[in-house]
Structure formats: C-alpha cells, structure tokens
Image: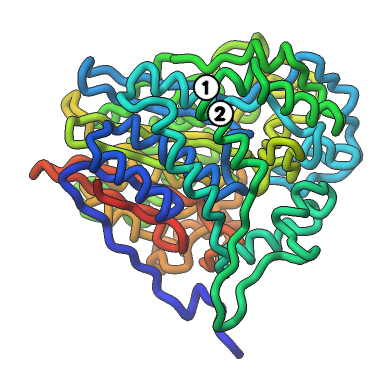
Amino acid sequence: MAQNLSRALRYAKDAVVGRNGVVAAQNQAAADVGAQVLAQGGNAVDAAVATAFALAVLEPWMSGIGGGGFMQIYDARSGKAQCVDFGMISPKRLDPADYPLAGGTAGDLFGWPAVVEDRNIVGYGSIALPGQPDGMRLALETFGTSSWAESLAPAIGLCEQGIEVDWFLSLVVASAARDLARFPASAAYFLPNGLPPSAEWAGTAPRLKNAALLATLKRLQSAGARDYYEGELARSLVHDLQAGGSKIAADDMAQFQARLVEPLLVQQGEATLVLPPGLTAGPTLADALARATPKLERGVAVPGAQSFVAYAEALDAAYEHRLATMGDTENNGGCTTNLCVVDKAGNMVTITQTLLSLFGSRVMLPESGVPMNNGIMWFDPRPGRPNSIGPAKRPLSNMLPSMVLKQGQPWFAIGASGGRRILPAVMQLISFVVDFGMSLEDAFHLPRIDASVVGQPAYNPRLPAEVIAALKARFPQAVERRLDPYPLPFACPSAVMFNADGSQTGMTEIGQPWASASAG
C-alpha cells in the first residue's frame, strides 16, 4: 500500500537571514517584491504594502483588493506600536431575514448552522465592504516613505506577466471549481476551457492573465486609493455588486474608512505582546496564554507533554469564552494570507489580509476583475447572539498579526492564515520562542497541535509518543491530522525577527510549497 505524502516526506525549510531587512510571505515572488523595496531604501511599511499588493495578484484565492484585514506596525521613529484596522463591514442595508436557516451544519470554516442556498458563504449576498485599498493608503500615508504609485508598480508588473500555473495552483483551483463555475467572470479566468488550468507534463507552464484586474490596478495607481471608494472604480464596483444582488451601495463605499487603533499590550514573562484589539483573535490569545502559562514546564529547552496539554486546555476554554461572548453589538472596535517585514532601521510590520474563504465569495466582478470576499460568513447566522448577522457591523474575525517586544524593543513579528487554526499556531510559536527560548527556525520545525475545535484537539503525528498519549488521555476525542500540503492540515504562519548580532531572520511554514522569505 502506498504511503500518503505526510508519511513519505520529511519537511524542512531553512530560515532566511539578512542585514538589510527580511520579508516573509506565503509566496516567494511576493516576498522578493518586498525585499527589493528594502534594497532600494524603502522602510518596512513600504515593503509590506508592496508585498500585500503583490499577493493580491499572485494569490487571488487568498487575499486582494476585494478583501480586508489588519496591520500591526512598530514605528522606530516614535518607539510606538499601532494597528491599522481595514477589516470588512457588512452593508448597512443588509437584512438578516435574507439568511434563513436551512437546518444542519454548513460546510464552511466555522461550522455555523447552514443557511438556505449558502447565501452567507457563496455569491453576492456573502460579500462585505472591502477595506484593503484604504488600509494600505492609511499605512503608507502615516508610516511609509514610498509613493502610492511606487507601491502598486510591482503588482501591476506581476499582473501583466500573469500567474504561472504550477501543480499547487492547479490543485487549489480544482478544489473550488464547482463554485467558481457559477460566476461567469470567475469561470472565464480560473477555468479556461471550462476546466482547471494545468501545465503539460514536460512542457512550459501556461500563465493566467487578468486583463480587467490589470486595468483596475492601473486606475488605482493613477487615481489613488479613494477612487476605489468614491470615484470611477467605486461606480464600477457598485454596479457589478448590485447587478449580482449585493446590498452594497455607493454610500456604503464612500463612508468606509480604515482606522488607526491602539493595539492590545500583554505581558508574557519579560516580553510584551502587541496584539490586534477588538473583534480579532488578539483578546482570545491573551486569554489563552493567561490560562496556559502557569502550567508550562520550566527549565526545559523544548515543551513536553505537560505543556502541550496546557496549550490544549487553555485554547479549549478560551475558544468557548470567545464564541459565547464576542461580537459587534454596538459597532465598537474590532483562506487568508500573512506577511511580516523588518528593516535595518528597527521598523517591524505584520499584516493579515484575507478574502476569508478560499476564493472568498467565488465572485470575480466582471468589469473590474476583482475577486471579492465572503466576509458575511464571519457572522453567526443565528439571531440574538453577539456576533449575529446584522447591518453595518464588524464581524468577529480570526486574524492575529502580532508583534513581540523585548525590554521595550522590537523582537519579532508573527501571524498566520488558516481561519480558526490561526490562534493555536500563533500562540504556540510565541510560547516556543518566549517561554522556551527556541530560535525561530527551531520553533517552526517543532510539531504543533491545533485546538480550534472545542473538545477535539488535532495533533501532528510527528509529536513525541508521550505527548500524543497525554493529549489522548486528557482529550479522548483527539485526532491525528495528516500533513499533506493540501488540504491545509494546520495554519500557515510566517515570522521575522531581529537578532542580537544586528541581522534579521525570516521564517515561513515548512509544509507550504509557496511560502518563503527573502532578504533585502
């Protein structure tokens, strides 16, 4: 019997070390874009914004200008950390009655009760107001040194070239082909000739080119970010959205503003964690660490059975509290990609941006070529709960771009993609480094657990036997998770770090084929 890939292969990935800054991202070409910005004298924010736009072109199923997210910035000039909130918001004319329950459980990331026709998951009714362009504008204007046009130029060049079709792209598109085929513009781009794109066995890889998105990016470059919300681009977006049945209107778009918010600061031993606040996973990470830290082993170099059980118990309790109590009840505070950047001047950035599901709503807008989010899926479709579907609300999201300071100075930045699996990954990696003194490279190679399903932690089969036995003893429903790159077995984290010798290190998830770091 053939072994599955997780048994046959042993994943490993070298950390990238530089002295002019490092970019870590879920796509090597995007990381190279950021590294080039650093090499040309740009700061970490300049590099991060250029990388974020490049990812919008290179991974259009993960994130893009039709999505939203959060950016954490440590500004070396002021010695302060700030959070840029460009999260998605539901349209103010949204009617919860349009999302009646169908009975059963939805087949989405969160296991919500099913909605009739999956209206909260797929299609125009699942789309929330996108924040990515205005978030990049606010970050660049406040902390960057590059111009808006310069920041978009690399993404435009990549869009002109198109995305090279490799085995991973073919696999990802095939996984969503049935839904993509429902929307003409999505099908025309992602399913040429009605089928997922693929390369010849020994031939040249074809490229997918999105001419409509290219024109949109060029317009965005010349007219500025607010054109997306108030100008010619806004009119195009709203026309297509409303033609498809979305409740998003011109005044929704015009009123959207990314915002600067104060991050959540949490002490963890001698380190200070800088977490996104409000309706992110930041408060839940703080809760989980407070529960787990007193139970961790001390005086050891690598966490053992006691520590992993503590992680699982803490995450279990923190998730229960999160889902029962958190939501936008008063419009207050608030598949994915993550990137991290440090520069030689001491600036540090981590961004999580998302379309939410893989391919978001599966809708590509015909006029603009923009893949759109399905941010309405973040809401609980059951009425009367803190995170219930409602108009003009911010959803409870899993994004967790985080930074860690040591003695008040920037140390490392981290984040991940993977829905509810983000929190367990980021929590453990922070603990591996802060509580056990592991290097970034060693921490990323240490097997982890996932505890995003309450009462049923999943474990990496490469964990020591005594750790697995302890988890099973404490959680009889614990399950082994295979390690193939797809479907995603655990979250996909990335991180960058300042080293004591003045260099910087970048590291990405070892089991993901496109994720990599690049030195400036």
Q: Is residue 302 above or below residue 404?
A: below
Residue occupying the point 23% across, 43% down: 39
User: Residue at position x 39%, y 30% from top?
Assistant: 290
Which is more toward the observer, 87 or 141? Answer: 141
Determine which quarter of the picture holds residue 270. top left
Disc 2 to disc 1, how far (Cα)?
5 Å
Secondary structure at badge 1 equals: loop
Q: Are marks 2 and 1 in contact (CB under 8 Å)?
A: yes
Q: Nearer the viewer, residue 6 or 148?
A: 148
Disc assigned to residue 224 = 1
222 to the left or right of 145? right
Q: Estimate the x, y position of residue 190 in percent, counting from the top left.
A: 70, 56
Q: Amino acid at mark 2?
A: Leu
Work out whether residue 424 or residue 133 is closer to the camera in this orientation and state it. Answer: 133
Residue 465 location (% of width, % of height): 41, 69
Residue farthest to the left, as pictured = 501
- Against 482, residue 456 (above or below) is above
Q: Do we see residue 313 in this rendering?
A: no
For mark 1, does the 10 Å Cα neighbourhood hold few (<14), some (14 to 19), or many (20 or more) residues? Answer: some
Name the mark on residue 286: none
Residue 376 in view here: yes
- Is disc 2 surrounded by few (<14), some (14 to 19) or many (20+) residues within 10 Å? many
The residue under the point 30% across, 45% down is 36
Q: The residue under label 1 is which amino acid type?
A: Gly
Mark 2 lies on residue: 220
Percent position of residue 395, x then y = 65, 25
Q: Nearer the viewer, residue 252 or 501?
A: 252
In the rendered image, the residue lying farthest to the bottom is 1
The kind of secondary structure element at disc 2 is helix
Residue at x 61% of width, y 90% of height: 1
